[in-house]
Image (tube, rainbow, N blue to C red):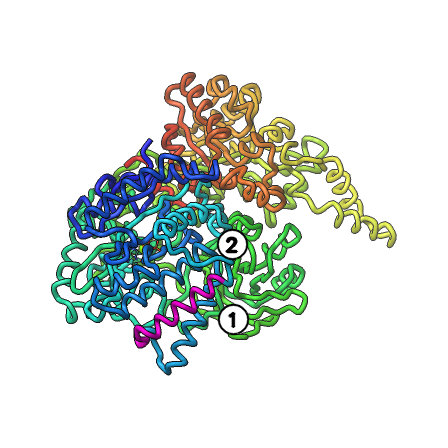
Amino acid sequence: QKFVYDFTEGNKDLKDLLGGKGANLAEMTNLGLPVPPGFTITTEACKVYLESGTEPAAMRDEVTAHLEALEAGMGKKLGQADNPLLVSVRSGAKFSMPGMMDTVLNIGLSDESVGGLADQAGDERFAWDSYRRLIQMFGKTVLGVDGDLFEEALEEAKQAKGVATDVELDAADLRTLVGEFKQIVAKETGRDFPQDPREQMDLAIRAVFDSWNGERAKLYRRQERIPGDLGTAVNICSMVFGNLGPDSGTGVAFTRDPASGHQGVYGDYLQNAQGEDVVAGIRNTMPLAELERIDKASYDQLMQIMETLETHYKDLCDIEFTIERGKLWMLQTRVGKRTAGAAFRIATQLVDQGLIDEAEALQRVTGAQLAQLMFPRFDEKAKTELLGRGIAASPGAAVGRAVFDSYTAVKWSRSGEKVILIRRETNPDDLNGMIAAEGILTSRGGKTSHAAVVARGMGKTCVCGAEELEVDTKQRKMTAPGGIVIEEGDVVSIDGSSGKVYLGEVPVVPSPVVEYFEGRMHAGADDADELVQAVHRIMAYADRMRRLRVRANADNAEDAARARRFGAQGIGLCRTEHMFLGERREMVERLILADHDEEREEALGALLPLQKADFVELFEAMDGLPVTVRLLDPPLHEFLPDITDLSVRVALAEARHEPHENDLRLLQAVHKLHEQNPMLGLRGVRLGLVIPGLFAMQVRAIAEAAAERRNAKGDPRAEIMIPLVGTVQELEIVREEAERVIAEVEQASGTRLGLTLGTMIELPRAALTAGQIAEAAQFFSFGTNDLTQTVWGFSRDDVEASFFTAYLEKGIFGVSPFETIDKDGVGSLVRAAAEAGRATRPDLKLGVCGEHGGDPESVHFFHEVGLDYVSCSPFRIPVARLEAGRAAA
Ligand code: ADP
Ligand code: MG
Ligand code: MG
């Protein structure tokens, strides 16, 4: 096993082994770009170190061999007194990660070699500046000395001399400072700053390895779901110097604008500076474009290199470079991060440039980015006052009055106030407050905290872990940096997409992407925004590419019409229970209370025309497209009054000797229907089998509505779906009755209705006996919400708020199985049931309804399993279309 790779040996595809930085340094080296020579110690070496506590034996020898080769090539030796080679030691994991050790520059300098460096460069000041930087960086990151101590000493030196910036300190000042820095190290660590250059290097390498398990790095990995065992690589890179005077400097650049995607010159440059000076804001940087004036040759070369990189990586890259006395050196590149909007624009720009094809363009964007673009957002032009920032936990833009406890949140929202619930962290007791609030803000906890998990589950805006905001729930106030105090009732605005928290009301604007999907903005229009044009094109690529069809979950004509505008190819789930609410609730009460046939039939008879009218509207809105209507599913008591309220009412009436016969009957019925476990009780097909005439009425309403549409020259395509079936016998009984009703309606209306009958697969038993069930079903729709509940034995209404946070923190799963389908468990049942069903009935239509239908990762899974369609809420349709396209591309 090889633990060390020269930059000439690696390439960009070796990120697992060499880390992102090392792989790309190698790639640039092999492209012939000017990269200072060096080598990379692999993540494998790191893994051995982390497991065993020591570096692998072979690693030390390999490092020695590579160092010798480097020295030979450079004609210098590491830290040699008269002609020193200096190196940087740089961490670099597969994914760039905050919390990893900072780079240490100028390794190899010592009391002896500092003189050699001065002679080499002919610049005494430069040598002492480099040395003080080494002690400072090494002291802080490798030896763990408080960095402020060095900063304070530097500040004092500047003050003593009466200057504002470090460049104004001369060689003698810096030499004195080096002495002070060494004393700080000795005092804080109980040992002298190491003078042996190889020891410096080895200690730095080990510190990089150790930083993999630093607290901040671990936290970040948990939040971003990065596996904990990848390890980090270490890059040893020969130094080039940007601090050798005004003809030297260091900079960062993007090959195009990461916010808009526009091509141009984007970056910052700082003369006579080293390393992080340019991003640290120590001195004012200049826009990269000005480099052209200072050093045209380097500037031109840099532009040339950026073009080479873009063409080579076929993507936006960001780069770090240094100029040493007029010679340009490349120190880093990677495919650059970008905003969601820029991702869409860049993908289409690259297609136009002929760099990538449509299929590749689809891989450059994600459904999550599209979803982000669909949230309303704060007006960018608005003047805002930033209070602080936290973690963007659940997207959206929310404005409301600050409240610090759930009780107040509920009370105020009942009286019509919009509120933002602010807590240090939330717990299950806050659930009602969270439901009542427009948004949730916490000062503690990460992406897997209770607040974040529950808010995402509810689709509610949430910023969490805003540590700079001090929340005092007792005093009902929050203090922002700078001393601004937010009291209960003050208005705040929170941005769940960026994590920013603002004072006062920031105006919210609708998303242009939604305006486009709604048809209120046209991509072809002259003034259409570039983003809309890009989204329009990417959606077209996806629609051309995808095999999965996308349907909507919608219960009324309005939602159906919107779904159609968003690109739905039918309705995959119409929940009829929503049609029984409101004023129709009383009719349902009557149906449930009926204790003889006549009474029951009367109640059903009253419901029939109303149901039918609903379906007529729905079929009209979805004319020509399939509409799957699910017969009544939820437990009946959901339609009845609350048992406690009702008991009180009856007791009161009794005490007052008022008539209460109806309430009493109702109460008895409620008692009778009360279940310990309603989700596993009398619901779904069980209702249809127990309440005579209920399903027949619903089927009749569907059939008559279809007949009416037919006669009006419409093209209704209704599919009747039976929920919660566990065995084929249940389905057969319902089916016989339904077929009889349909035949009657067909005969009476003189039309063929072409209705199909199918079932949901949402119980493990149904999945396991899918082969039998397919004999009585023309289609399956996987109800993955209930299937997840029943396969895991998780009560969906309870677990997310009670123990999922703990499960996520312990890494039992990385994401809630209600959010992304559990492929190994629930998913394998889906796969097996699909296969068994098709074995029985080759033309069996297969779909999925439920939250997973709009979840990016789950959509890929359903594509792979070979379903015909996914169905999701109207707003998720574009995301599902895009992901279905990406899955097929
Ligand atoms: P990060 O991962 O934080 O970007 P880097 O390893 O890229 O850390 O180092 C930060 C900066 O240090 C670089 O952008 C560059 O300016 C400087 N640097 C690193 N190695 C060298 C080197 N060999 N010569 C000169 N500057 C270097
Ligand atoms: Mg860097
Ligand atoms: Mg269900």
Q: Is residue 222 visible?
A: yes
- Name the quadrant of the C terminus: top left
Residue range (magenta): 167-186
Residue 42, how many percent across, how many down? Answer: 34, 40
CA separation, marks 1 and 2?
A: 26 Å
Residue at 61% across / 41% down in the picture?
Answer: 799
Residue at 52% across / 21% down in the picture?
Answer: 768
619 over 305 or under it: above or below: above
Q: Which residue is mark 2?
A: 460
Which residue sits furthest bottom? 162
Please say whether residue 179 is one of the residues in the magenta stretch: yes
Residue 882, how many percent across, how many down? Answer: 33, 43
**Dot 2, how many residues are within 10 Å of its Cα: few (below 14), some (14-19), or many (20+)?**
many
Secondary structure character of the magenta stretch overall: helix
Q: Which residue is mark 1?
A: 481
Numbered disc 1: secondary structure: loop
